[in-house]
Image (tube, rainbow, N blue to C red):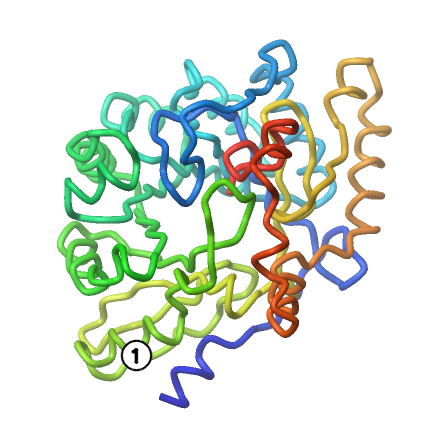
Amino acid sequence: MDDLSLSCSRRQFTGESVYDLYGRPLRSLRLSVTDRCNLRCRYCMPEEDYVWLPREDVLSFEEMATLAGYFVDVGVDKVRLTGGEPLLRRDLPRLVRLLAQNRGITEIALTTNGVLLAEQAQALYDAGLHRVTVSLDTLKPDRFRRLTGRDEFDRVLEGIAAARTVGFPNLKLDTVMIRGFNDDELVPLIEFARHIGAEVRFIEYMDVGGANEWTMDKVLSCQVMLEQLSRRYGEIVAIAGRGAAPAQRYRLADGTTFGIIPSTTMPFCRQCDRSRVTADGMWYLCLYALEGIDLRGPLRQGAGPNHIRELIRAGWRSRRDRGAEMRKELERTGMRERELIGIERLREDPHLEMHARGG
């Protein structure tokens, strides 16, 4: 398994953009359109009630498109719409159309839990959405209900089917693997994705926020996943050219591909070109960051384009974030689990949980 271990290693990339203190360019923007969600997944937002962002603070679609444009001006060319659950935001295709007008954006993508996708897939496609990623953590309806607190499994499958029918290319399924919960579904999920013409990406359980009750013993590592899959499929080959992508992709002997995002055990901070803007205009340079930069304030106070572009340039140039690597380093002293943010603090600041900043 030494070759498989090496295949999880980091890769470098090059490119032209604004660079941070580690030489990482600003290329990808994750734009959260809402902090609300219609599921209560155990690994993301398991509580029934949260402190939500004030509605008057949430950006309009025009404001979001304007901010995205400023990011494009300084190097971003990919925008991913996230949440919460982004399809809860009414008339989301209108935002897609606004973004599609910007010729500097080469890819507009969407991450969704799929519950509302069947009824919106065609409109999103027609508006100019390029790619869709659907979260699918299990193929068992009863397990889905326990994980999400909702009985919506069939609607998720309908959403996936609709995305295929509409014609979205490169459909991806994101699966958070939790040891002792869904770690018996690695092979079934690969087979399901193969059957529908999609690619599954297995995500290591991450210690973001704190309400999810994360512990290291619940993490199914990249290495363990590869070992289990190799026993079923034989030789697994890492696909070169990962660049700044979060997933390392692999190919089975029959050509089937899948990905693993090993951010917990094998962080890829040194290649990260992503940042996140919340639905109320706070800019976070790292998923683990505790503080963000307010872009809504200057935007609504009438700051000119050059001023906001310079805020973005200056913020990125001073970026030294490597949150996943720092969490990894805490394992040596046994402090990693103690760094989780307590539920009371999460209730005080709605920005600190992943659902507010678009995981």
Above or below for 239 versus 305: below
From the viewer's side, name the closer residue of 347 and 264.
Answer: 347
In front here: 234 or 209?
209
Instruction: Give coordinates of residue 347: x percent, y percent.
Output: 59, 28
Q: Is residue 47 above or below residue 208?
A: above
Q: Residues within 10 Å of mark 1 (few under 14, many from 20)?
A: some
Where residue 172 appears, as percent x and y from the top left, is 32, 49
Residue at 66% x, 65% y: name it: 270
Kindly identify which residue carries mark 1: 227
Question: Is 201 located above or below residue 58 in the figure?
Answer: below
Amino acid, disc 1: Glu
* Circle 1: element type: helix
- Looking at the picture, tell me which residue is in the foreground, 50 or 323: 50
Quadrant (top left, top right, bottom left, bottom right) of the N terminus: bottom left
Residue at x 15% of width, y 40% of height: 141
Q: Is residue 60 above or below residue 326?
A: above
